[in-house]
Image: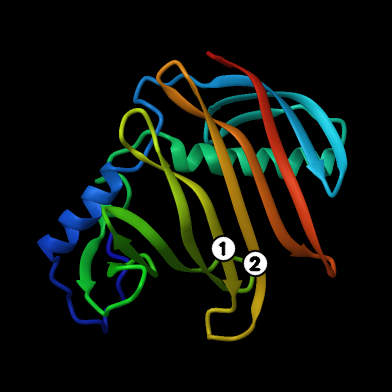
Amino acid sequence: MDHQKQDQPTVADDPKARALLRQAFENTARWQSDFKGFTADLTVNVNGKETRGPVMVKGPREVSVQLGEADVQKWAQEQIGMIAVHRGPRSFEQSDGQYTLTMEEDGHPFGTKLIIHGSNSFYRVKDQRITQINRKMAHPGMPPFAFTINVEDSAVTQDRKNLTTKYTVYYYSPDGGKLTNVESFTDTHVRVGASDLPATRRITSYEHGQVTVKSLTFSNHKLI
């Protein structure tokens, strides 16, 4: 499907850009292709208030969380679903490889700029890692917004893959307007069998006039 506007000139795919992004993609830790999911005990802490319950994760759209409070449960389910989306097995061709790719060397500290044409996105890649993601979004019934993710730290798994452990997301209006929120994520992981599963996630953000700290803690992991 061609996402490009008709008045834009056709952009030629750059094989060097494709090779660079493919290498970074393939160096990123994901659950193995035969991964069936896991169960765990979950503790959610919102500014000191704890809620506990079981969680089952089978895939990005198959996340079951049982907590006593509906709003906390909904938030935790969304967070764990996002983890599953990023960690789920998929090929390069199924993700960014489907788009036309070009690159620019602009001396940026986060590395080479990779433009993903037709997706309103560009990345930066350095040392075979995706170090920054920039994207503009538009959903029906919602004002458009943009975000930048800076990947600040990552671990190397037993399989010699990169697994992000710290990143910050900046949300802002796409016309270059004001910053609307910042979320800082810190993750840890635990190896169970051949899988690196979430152990903790802490998110610091600005909500309702204050800085809020929320955490997810997983324990007693069992593979399905």
Q: Is residue 76 above or below residue 117?
A: above
What colouring method underlies this structural image?
A: rainbow
**Circle number at residue 184:** none
Q: Is residue 19 above or below residue 93?
A: below
Q: Nearer the viewer, residue 137 or 40?
A: 40
Question: Residue 74: x, y in percent?
Answer: 74, 41
Say what secondary structure mark 2 lies in.
strand
Q: Which residue is mark 1?
A: 169
- Going from N to C along the chain, the mark reached first, 2 or 1, is 1
Count of numbered labels shown in the rendering: 2
| Amino acid marked by disc 1 | Val
Say what secondary structure mark 1 lies in.
strand
Residue that appears at 49% across and 41% down: 85
14 sits to left or right of 203: left
Q: CA distance from mark 2 to mark 1?
A: 6 Å
Q: Residues within 10 Å of mark 2 (few under 14, many from 20)?
A: many
Q: Quadrant of the N terminus?
A: bottom left
Question: Residue 118: x, y in percent?
Answer: 32, 67
122 sits to left or right of 203: left
Q: Nearer the viewer, residue 61 or 5?
A: 61
Q: Quadrant of residue 66?
A: top right
Residue that appears at 33% across and 49% down: 95
Q: Which residue is mark 2?
A: 182
Question: Residue 129: x, y in percent?
Answer: 32, 53
Q: Is residue 36 above or below residue 79?
A: above
Residue that appears at 60% across and 48% down: 186
Q: Is residue 166 above or below residue 201?
A: below
Question: Residue 38: x, y in percent?
Answer: 56, 20
104 sits to left or right of 173: left
